[in-house]
Amino acid sequence: MSHVAQQHAPNVVSVVRLGRSLAAEIQGVDLSQPLNEASFAAIHHAFLENEVLIFRDQDISADDMMSFGRRFGPLSIHPFSPTMSDKPELIVLDNHRDNPPRLTDIWHSDETFRETPPLGTMLRSTITPRIGGDTMFASMSAAFEGLDDRTQKFLSGLEAEFDFKPFRTLFGNDEEGRRKLHELEDRWPQLCHPVIRVHPESGRKSIFVNRQFTIGIKGMKASESGPLLEMLYGLANQPEYQFRLQWRQNTMAFWDNRVVLHYAIHDYHPQRRRMERVTIAGDKPFGVDHPYGGQLVERPEIELTDADAPPDATAMPVRIFKRD
C-alpha cells in the first residue's frame, strides 16, 4: 500500500519524525471525528516517544479539540489567561495591532508555579500571520542526556523554587491591585519542584527549570544558584535540542509540558495571530529518589535516510512509524 493510501485507511496512524531530539507529524487523523482505541493508543505512544506532535489541516471546533484533550486527562483552567465564559478550559490568544503579544517570548514550561503543572498543552492556529509567529520547542530530556554523568548526579539532588512572577505585572500598584495580588499569592504560594524530573509515564529524566517561573534553587544563595540556572536555561538555546514549528491555519500542536520548553516568537506584530489552547491537568513532579514504577520509553533511534521519507516531505526525512 502506498504512503498516500495509508493516510486515508481506517485505523492507521502515520507518525513522521521531524527533528532529531523531538517532534513528529501525525498523519491520517481527522480530529473532528471520534478516535477508536487503536488510533488513540498509537497517538499516545507517539506523544511519549516524540514529546511534540503536529497535526496539520485540522479544521475542527473548540469542542472537538477539548474532547481530544480529555482523552489524555481532565482539562485545567488557567488562573490568569483569558478564557471563554462558556468554556473556561479554553484559552483564546488573539494578538493584533491593538493587542500585541506579551509574556511568551521566553523559554518556559506552562504553569510550573502550580503544585501539579500541566501534563501537556494543545494549541491550534485559527488565524496565522503571513510572516513570522513561529513557535520553538526544546527537549529538556535530550538536554539532560547531553550532560556529563557528574553534572547529572549533582543536579539530581536539587530542588528549584517557583513563582508566578511574570503574571505579577498584570496587577496595578493601587490598593485594589495589591489586594488581588495578595489573594493570588495566598492561593499560589511559592513552591519547589525537583530540578531533574522523572517523567511519570516514559521514565525519562529531564531538566525541569525555566526562566519564566523559576526563581532560585532551594538551599543556595542567589550568587550560587544564579550561574547554575543560567547554564541550565542556556541549554534550550542549543539547536540540537530544538524544533521550530511554522504555523499554518488549522495546524494543531500538542506538547508534553513535563519535558518540553517552548518559546513563542513575537516577530509578527502588527499582523494578527489567533490561537485556541486547552491544557491537560498533570500531577505533582517527582525526582530521581522517587520509586518509579513505570516502563522506560527509550528515545527512538532515528535513521536519517531519504528512503524512508514520504515523497512530499519538507522537513528532515526520517522513519515513518505505522501502526494499525
Image (spheres, rainbow, N blue to C red):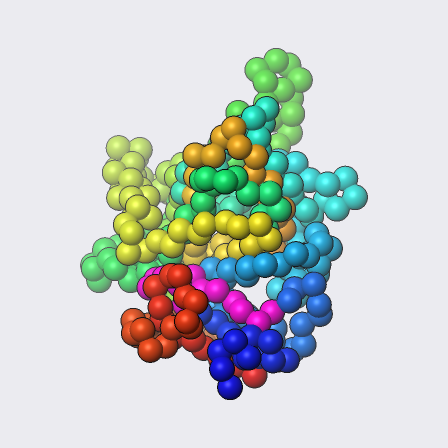
Q: Is residue 24 magenta?
A: yes
Q: Determine the image quadrant of residue 107.
A: top left
In the image, taking residue 139 as reference, residue 78 lies left or right, namely right
Number of marks in the image? 0
Residue 161 visible in rendering: no
On the image, which quarter does residue 145 sit in? Answer: bottom left
Residue at 29% over, 36% down: 226
Q: Depth check: give the residue in front, 198 or 202.
A: 202
Front one among 251 and 229: 251
Q: Residue at x 52, y 67 (%)?
A: 26
Residue at coordinates 60% horizontally, 43% vertically from top-left?
127
Q: Where is residue 39 drawn, in percent x and y? A: 60, 76
Residue 65 visible in rendering: yes
Question: On the rendered structure, is 121 left or right of 175?
Answer: left
Q: The C terminus is located in which quarter?
A: bottom right
Q: Looking at the image, which residue sits at the far right?
A: 86
User: Residue 199: x and y, percent?
Assistant: 45, 63
Of residues 142 and 207, the one drawn nearer to the viewer in this rendering: 142
* Position in image of residue 320 (x %, y %): 43, 75
Q: Which residues are magenta?
A: 17-29
Question: Residue placed farthest to the top in the image?
Answer: 174
In magenta stretch: residue 139: no
Q: Main secondary structure of the magenta part?
A: loop
Residue at 29 percent across and 74 percent down: it is: 305
* Looking at the image, residue 319 lies above or below residue 177: below
323 left or right of 10 in image: left
For the view shown, which residue lies furthest in the bottom direction? 1
Residue 181 location, x and y as percent? 60, 26
Q: Nearer the viewer, residue 29 or 77?
A: 29
> Vertically, is 89 above or below 48?
above
